[in-house]
Amino acid sequence: MNEPTVSSLSAGRALPVVSSRAYNASIAFFAFMAAVGVAFGLHAMYAGHEAVYNCTREIPWGLLIATYVFFVVTSTGLCIVSSLGHVFGFESFVPVAKRAVFLSIATIVSGFMVIAFEIENPWRMAIYNMISPNLTSNIWWMGTLYGVYLFFMAVEFAMLQMNRHKAASILGLLGVLSGIAAHSNLGAVFGLLGAREFWHGPYMPIYFITSAAMSGCAAVLLFTYIAYKTNGWQMSDRLKSSLRAVAYTGAFLMATLIFFDIWKVISGIAGHPPGKYEATMALVKGPYAFNFWVGEVLMGMVLPFVIILGTKGKSVPALFMAGLLCVIGIFFMRYDLVLVGEIVNPFHEYGVLDFPLYLSYVPSFHEIMITIGGLSFCAMAFLMGEKMFRGHLAEEHH
C-alpha cells in the first residue's frame, strides 16, 4: 500500500485514505456478512423467535442481549474517552477524539441492529415510546435515553467535521451526560430485578459505567492501530503519547474492575445468599468458570494490565494487543453477566425430580449469525468511516 502524503492540519484538509483492493474487499466482505445477519434476523421474525432462538421462558435473555450490552457499553465508553479531549480539555485525548466519536455512533447503531432482531416486534418500541410512555419502566428509559444519546453524538460528529468545535463541545457534553444516564439506567435494568439475586443491588449501574470507560479505552487502542496499519500511516509522537494516556487510563480502570470482581465474588459467597451463591459458584468453578477466569479475568483485565505496565505504554503493537485482548474479554464479561444471572434453577431447592441446579443455554445458529452480522456491520462502518472521513484527523500524519 502506498504511503500517503502529509496533509497539514492547519490547512484544514484531512488526509486522503489510499484505497486498495484488499481494503475495498474487506468492506465488501463485512457488508455481505452484515446483510447475512440481517437476513437471519428477518427470517427469525417470520418463523417466530421460539422456533429459531434457544431462549426459553426460564432463560429469556441470551446471546443477542449480551451482544447488545457489549455494543452499547463500548459506545458509552468511547463517548467518555472522546469527551475527555474536546469537552473537558485534556489535551492528551484530543488526537483520538474524532475517531472515538465516530466509533461510538457505529457501535450504538450495531447494538440497535442486534436488539431489533431480539425484540419480536421492534417497531412497537418506536411507536409506543412516544404515544404511550411508561415512565416507571427502565426499559422505556433505556430506549429513550439511548435515542437521545445517538442524536447528540451524531450532531456532535457533524459539528466536528465542520470544525465548529465550540458547538461540538456543547453537544459532546450533552452526549456524555445522556450516555452515562442511559448506561447507568441499563445497569438498573439488571440491578432492580429483585427476582434475579445475582444482578440485584445498587452495584450494577456503577459497575456498568466503570466497565464502559474501560471498554472505550480498549476500543480506541484496537481501532486506532488497525486504522493506521491498513492505511500505511506512521503515527506521530503526539498520537503515540495520546494512546499511552488512553492505555494508562484503561489500566487504572482494569485495576478498579479487578477489585469490583473480587468483592462481587466475596459478596456472592459469604453467608451463602440464596440464588446469588449458586450463580457465583457457576462463575468460580461451575459451567462458566472458563469464561470467567480465562475470558473475563485473564484476557479482559490481567493480561492487558500487565502488557500496558510492562511496556510502559511505549509499544504501539503491544497496546494494540492489550486492546484486542481486552475487547475479547469484555465480550465474555457481557455474556457471563447476562447468562449467569438466569441459569440458577429457582425450583432446585425444593428437591423436585429432573430440576437441575443450573439451567442450560446454547445459542442457536440464528442467534450466532445475527451476532456475527452486528459485529460485521460495526467493522464495515469503521472501515468506511476511515475512507469517508479521511482518517478522522486531529493531528498530522507522516
Image (tube, rainbow, N blue to C red):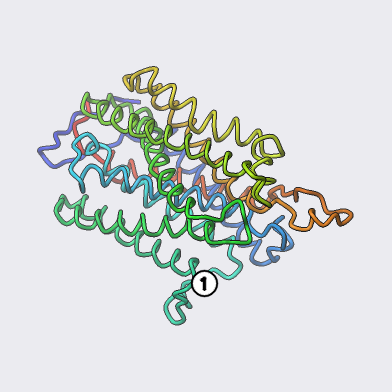
Name the element at disc 1: helix
Task: Establish if 109 lies above or below 128.
Answer: above
Which residue shows up at 60% across the image and 30% down it?
A: 294
Question: What type is the residue that disc 1 sits on?
Answer: Trp
Residue farthest along the top direction in this orientation = 310
Which quadrant, please, contains the C terminus?
Answer: top left
Q: Splitting the image into 4 quarters, where does residue 27 fall? A: top left
Which quadrant, please, contains the N terminus?
Answer: top left
Q: Nearer the viewer, residue 27 or 161?
A: 161
Horizontal and vertical percent for residue 127? 47, 77
Q: Nearer the viewer, residue 121 or 307?
A: 307
Which residue shows up at 47% across the image and 73% down it?
A: 136
Residue farthest along the right direction in this orientation = 353
Task: Establish if 282 lies above or below 46.
Answer: above
Which residue shows up at 45% across the image and 65% down it?
A: 143
Which residue shows up at 61% across the image and 67% down it?
A: 120
Residue 357 horizontal side relative to residue 33, left or right: right
Q: Nearer the viewer, residue 346 or 128?
A: 346
Residue farthest along the bottom direction in this orientation = 131
- The total number of labels drawn is 1
Horizontal and vertical percent for residue 166? 14, 53
Which residue was labeled with disc 1?
123
Horizontal and vertical percent for residue 30? 50, 44
Horizontal and vertical percent for residue 310? 39, 17
Residue farthest along the left direction in this orientation = 10
Residue 372 horizontal side relative to residue 383, left or right: right
| Within-10-Å neighbours for mark 1: few <14, some 14–19, many 20+ | few
Q: Nearer the viewer, residue 107 or 185?
A: 185
